Structure formats: C-alpha cells, structure tokens
C-alpha cells in the first residue's frame, strides 16, 4: 500500500512510518515539524526509496490537496496532533486549532481526493486517538468502544471533537474511516516532556523526579512498537466505520511505574543509585484523571492482535535506548517548555 501518514516525525507517527517502510509499504510522511517533531526519528528509513517527506501543516488545505493528488495514497493515517495535557492547560487554543480544525481540514482534503478518484473501495482514512476521550475511571472497570465520551482536559476534549468529526464524515459523506483509541504509549523517541522520559532524564542528571499528587493515578502502558503494529493491523483488516481500543494490558500506578524505572536505572546506570531517592511529590495537575484502563477484547477477537511486550520488558528496552541515544535527547532539551513544569494554571 501507499500510506500518507500525518505527524510521521512525532513519537507514535515515526514508529508507524518505520514499521510501514520495513513492512514493504510506500510512505509519504506529512509533518509541520512543530516543537515535538524530529526528523531524526525516521532517519533509519529516510534514504529508503519507499519513503518521502512533505513539510506540510494539516491546516493548509491547498497543500494537502496537492500532496494527495501528487502521491495518490491508498490510505491516510492521521496521527498529527497536539498531545501534551499540561500544555493544553496552559494554551488550549493550539489544541483546538490543530486537533479540531486540522482534522476537519484533512477530512475535507481526503474526501475531495477520494471523490475525485471515483470512490476507490479500498481507500481508508484511519484516525488515531486516545483513551482520554472517555474521561476518568474509578477503581474498577475498563473503557470499551461504546463507553460514553467524557473528556476532562482541553487535550482530551479536542481529541473527542476530532473523533466525532471523523464519524460524521463517515455517516454523512460515506468516507471510509476506521478509528482507534489507545492507552498511554512509551518507548524509543518519546519526546522528553512526557512522564517516562522525564523520569529517566532527571534521574540521569541527579535532579528531582516529579510525581503529581500522591502518584496513585493509574495508566495502562502500551509499548510504541506494539501500537504501531496494531495500527497497521487495523488499517488493513479493520471494519469500515468501526473503532478499536488498543491497550497494553499493563496497568500500573504512576508511583509504582516511577519506582520500576528507578530500579532498572539502578541496574543499568548505577551511578547515583538508588535513583528512587530523587522522587519528589509535587502539586497535582488540575483535573487529573484518576485511572485509564482499556478493554482490548474487540481488536483481539476480531483481528487477532494483542501486545507482545510486557511492561517490564518495555521499560528495560526504553531505559537502554535513552542510555544509548544521548545525542538525540540532549538536542531536544533546549526546545520550548522542556525541563519546566507546565499545566499549573487553575
């Protein structure tokens, strides 16, 4: 297939780009190269003749139309998004602009292309979203595809809006779409403002490791390479108009996760051990969701997919990657907001 992947220089998008190229697909990477994007993320495939890059913003309708008509993809995988909850608290407008207006613009461009090509039956628009659109769980239960939307942050609200737009373009205009909602991702090339890289990099620097509130918030963690594999599976075999929840089957509280990372660092980088002495509890994030948990039954039963990497394996792989790729993350530490507490507005 020829795939147009938006946000392919970001964390999850670049994992999809790499796997797709290695699997033999042609890939057109469309990215605006905002603060969290990095072309080094796709350096491993950049010289592959099956890969090309288009420096285009998803809000630019004419540029999108040009890219679509020039490259004539078989599918669009939409991963471009503002994604950091803390940044959405400080500046929600960028999230509405990119995640809502940008998704609308891309949908219109894809619809125009699909209609102009005579409604090819195999075309797909795959929208990648988050489990945060479902809101917050209590101590029990899991998010299912039919769980009512209840977003709590500007980020999750903007993603919920984009999900609704995609479904509307399917029901109203017939655009052949599939949707996925994933749990928290982690792994190589994770931008150093998110929890796991913050823990690793602060520990390496001997700086306090911030844990919001009491650290009791629970997340389901999904290794990014597993997620990329799931996305390509849904794209090729998922039912049109259907959504699929993708989870890592790895629930853990934030404080337990941080302690696990510190234990791995004690083994792999004993300088400064024990690293858990650096754990520092800080004021909680406004509106911090208590717990997310995915029920992955649909993707397992319909498509035969389930994660292959346990949390313990994934954390070891991730810590080792950051230890071995210091040039990558050091180059990003001067970018806007990195290393500073965000999302404290009330």
Image (cartoon, rainbow, N blue to C red):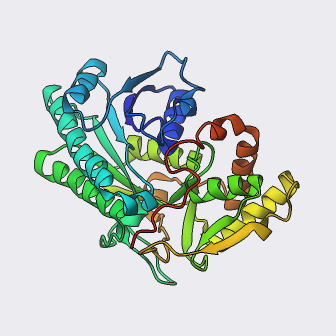
Residue 29 drawn at (x, y percent): 41, 29
Residue 327 drawn at (x, y percent): 69, 34
Report whether 145 appears left or right of 60: right
Residue 78 drawn at (x, y percent): 35, 42
90 vs 280: above or below = above
Residue situated in front as seen by the camera: 209 or 16: 209
Residue situated in front as seen by the camera: 86 or 224: 86
82 vs 34: above or below = below
Residue drawn at (20%, 34%), measured in percent from left and top? 109
62 vs 299: above or below = above
Residue drawn at (15%, 32%), measured in percent from left and top? 112
Res. 40 visible in picture:
yes
Report whether 22 appears left or right of 294: right
Residue drawn at (21%, 45%), measured in percent from left and top? 104
In what quadrant of the picture does the N terminus appear?
top left
Residue 290 drawn at (x, y percent): 49, 77
In what quadrant of the picture does the C terminus appear?
bottom left
Residue situated in front as seen by the camera: 296 or 322: 322
Report whether 48 appears left or right of 104: right
Report whether 244 appears left or right of 212: left
């Amino acid at each position: 297939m020829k795939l147009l992947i938006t946000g392919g220089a970001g964390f999850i998008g670049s994992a999809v780009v790499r796997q797709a190229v290695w699997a033999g697909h042609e890939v057109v990477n469309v990215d605006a190269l905002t603060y969290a994007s990095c072309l080094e993320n796709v350096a491993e495939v950049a010289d592959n003749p099956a890969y090309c890059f288009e420096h285009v913003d998803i809000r630019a309708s004419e540029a999108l139309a040009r890219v679509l008509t020039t490259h004539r993809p078989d599918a669009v995988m939409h991963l471009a998004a503002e994604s950091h909850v803390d940044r959405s608290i400080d500046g929600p407008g960028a999230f509405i602009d990119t995640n809502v207006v940008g998704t609308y613009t891309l949908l219109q461009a894809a619809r125009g292309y699909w209609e102009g090509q005579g409604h090819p039956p195999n075309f797909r628009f795959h929208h990648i979203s988050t489990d945060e659109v479902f809101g917050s769980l209590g101590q029990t239960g899991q998010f299912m595809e039919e769980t009512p939307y209840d977003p709590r942050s500007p980020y999750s609200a903007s993603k919920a809006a984009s999900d609704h737009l995609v479904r509307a373009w399917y029901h109203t205009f017939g655009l052949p779409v599939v949707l996925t909602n994933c749990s928290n991702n982690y792994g190589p090339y994770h931008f150093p403002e998110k929890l796991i890289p913050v823990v690793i990099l602060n520990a390496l620097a001997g700086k306090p490791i911030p844990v919001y509130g009491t650290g009791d918030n629970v997340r389901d963690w999904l290794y990014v390479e597993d997620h990329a594999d799931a996305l390509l599976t849904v794209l090729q075999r998922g039912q049109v108009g259907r959504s699929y929840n993708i989870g890592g089957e790895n629930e853990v509280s934030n404080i337990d996760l941080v302690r696990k990372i510190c234990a791995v660092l004690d083994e792999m980088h004993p300088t400064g051990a024990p690293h858990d002495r650096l754990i520092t509890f800080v004021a909680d994030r406004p509106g911090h969701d208590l717990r997310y948990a995915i029920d992955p039954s649909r993707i397992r039963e319909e498509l035969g997919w389930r994660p292959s990497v346990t949390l313990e394996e994934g954390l070891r792989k991730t810590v080792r990657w950051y230890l071995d790729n210091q040039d990558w993350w050091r180059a990003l530490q001067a970018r806007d907001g990195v290393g500073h507490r965000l999302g404290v507005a009330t």
